[in-house]
Every structure is written in C-alpha cells, then in structure tokens.
C-alpha cells in the first residue's frame, strides 16, 4: 500500500506544476514520495490505530494536501485497506484541485488526463472519473447517482470488465488503454469542456446497463 501511495504522489508531482516535495498529512507532517519511509510510517501509524480500536476491517482514512504554482491547492482524501462487505464502505481515493480564494478555472488544466492516468496506474481501481462540480450537479439533477457506481466525467476510466460490458454504448467515444482497462476521453482536443447535457445523457445511457453497476462488495472490481 505504501508503494501505491508513493507512486500516486510521485505521479501527481510529475504533472502538476510546482507540487514536487510539498505534501503534508493531516498532522502537518511532511510526506516525501522520494523518501518512502515518511509515507510508510504515516500509513503504518494509521493502521496501528485501527488495530487498537478493533476495527481493522474498516480500513483507514488518509488525508494529504499540497500546493502548486498559480495558486493551485490539492487535497487527497482516501479510504484504503478496508475488507468489510458493508455496502456503505468502499476503498476510494479522491483528488480535489482548487485555486486559492475559490477562484475558478477558465479552462480545464492540461494535466487532468495525466492525473487520471496516475491514479489508475497507482491503484488499479474498478473505475475512476475526472469531473467538475458543475457536471456532477447536472448529473444529480437528472437522477440519483447510486452508491459505488461510476460516473461519466470529463474523462472516465473503466476496468476491463466494465469496458467490455459497455460495448456499443462507447461507440464514437475516444478511448485508449490505460492500466488494465480503458479511459474514455470526453474533453475536446483543445481541452475544452464538452456540452454537459451530452455527458448527462451518456451517463444515463450507461447507467441503464451493467457497465455502471455498483462495485461488488466481495471483490475489488466488477
């Protein structure tokens, strides 16, 4: 698990300007992906607390943050190592990128695709998406998003089994192999956000099939 975290943090450092070497955990302790010991000790300490509480099957909650150039603020929240079959529990990692003072982005950062690939290559997830609050609000307005299910983002990763189940629903979409699955890329070539209504409609079409079924509780991927 420490190796996956080191790979993930290093992958972010490689593509986001100005982040390298600037990670901190919730206790404001420095995390250096170049020195795996700081990351390993962080994770070991979190698991030792779970063991002491007798709740190891719930995994651990980990938080890390950093800053980049141009006022970028990055925050990671993750639940990892869980083995419980509770449907409300899932192992997950969320990377949130904002700008200081809640200043919005005029366009989607060039590194968005690379960040999604860094997450996939580090964690081999069942699914992952890169999106915006505006897109997620539009999807929620069109219908409730069930727990543990993928979403059509600006770019969405589907594990091998999900991509196979999607079949013709992805016809006409740009896809490329990443990790053990595929990334479906909805951004325009220039990095502009596509029509949100189109993404909402595609999300609903995929949600009606097996490709967007909930992640199982008895295995890591569909």
Image (spheres, rainbow, N blue to C red):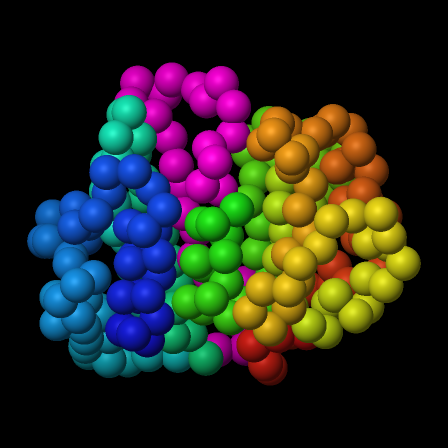
* Residue shown at the point (35%, 71%) measured from the top left: 4
Question: What is the total number of numbered labels drawn onto the structure image?
Answer: 0
- Give the residue at the far right of this rendering: 168
* Residue shown at the point (27%, 73%) measured from the top left: 2
**Nearer-the-camera pick, 109 or 51:** 109
Q: Based on the displayed image, in which of its 4 quarters is residue 46 positioned?
A: bottom left
Depicted 5 relative to depicted 83: above or below: above
- Give the residue at the far left of this rendering: 29
Q: Is residue 16 magenta?
A: no
Left or right: 179, with 166 as reference point: left
Q: Is residue 94 magenta?
A: yes
Q: Position of residue 219 (x, y in %)?
A: 59, 81
Left or right: 63, with 204 as reference point: left
Quadrant where the C terminus sits is: bottom right
- Give the residue at the far front of this rendering: 189
Left or right: 188, with 111 as reference point: right
Whether residue 3 is visible to the viewer of this picture, yes or no, is: yes
Q: Position of residue 1 (x, y in %)?
A: 32, 75
- First to last magenta residue range: 84-112
Left or right: 177, with 125 as reference point: right
Whether residue 89 is visible to the viewer of this picture, yes or no, is: no
* Residue shown at the point (52%, 23%) measured from the top left: 107
Q: Position of residue 127 (x, y in %)?
A: 60, 61
Q: Position of residue 199 (x, y in %)?
A: 75, 37
Depicted 211 relative to depicted 59: above or below: above
* Residue shown at the point (38%, 17%) measured from the top left: 103
Depicted 93 relative to depicted 103: above or below: below
**Nearer-the-camera pick, 30 or 142:** 30
């Amino acid at each position: 698990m420490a190796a996956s975290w080191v790979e993930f943090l290093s992958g972010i450092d490689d593509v986001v300007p100005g982040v390298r070497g600037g990670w901190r955990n919730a206790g404001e302790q420095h995390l250096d992906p170049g020195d795996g010991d700081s990351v390993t000790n962080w994770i070991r300490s979190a698991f030792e607390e779970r063991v002491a509480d007798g709740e190891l099957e719930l995994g651990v909650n980990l938080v890390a943050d950093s800053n980049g150039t141009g006022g970028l603020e990055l925050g990671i929240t993750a639940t990892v190592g869980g083995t419980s079959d509770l449907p409300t529990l899932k192992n997950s990692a969320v990377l949130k990128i904002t700008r200081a003072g809640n200043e919005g982005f005029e366009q989607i950062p060039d590194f968005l695709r690379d960040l999604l690939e860094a997450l996939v290559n580090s964690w081999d997830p069942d699914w992952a998406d890169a999106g915006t609050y505006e897109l997620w609000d539009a999807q929620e307005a069109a219908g409730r998003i069930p727990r543990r299910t993928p979403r059509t983002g600006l770019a969405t990763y589907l594990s091998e089994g999900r991509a196979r189940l999607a079949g013709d629903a992805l016809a006409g979409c740009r896809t490329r192999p990443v990790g053990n699955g595929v990334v479906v890329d909805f951004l325009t070539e220039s990095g502009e956000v596509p029509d949100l209504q189109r993404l909402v409609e595609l999300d609903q079409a995929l949600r009606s099939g097996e490709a967007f079924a909930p992640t199982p509780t008895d295995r890591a991927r569909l």
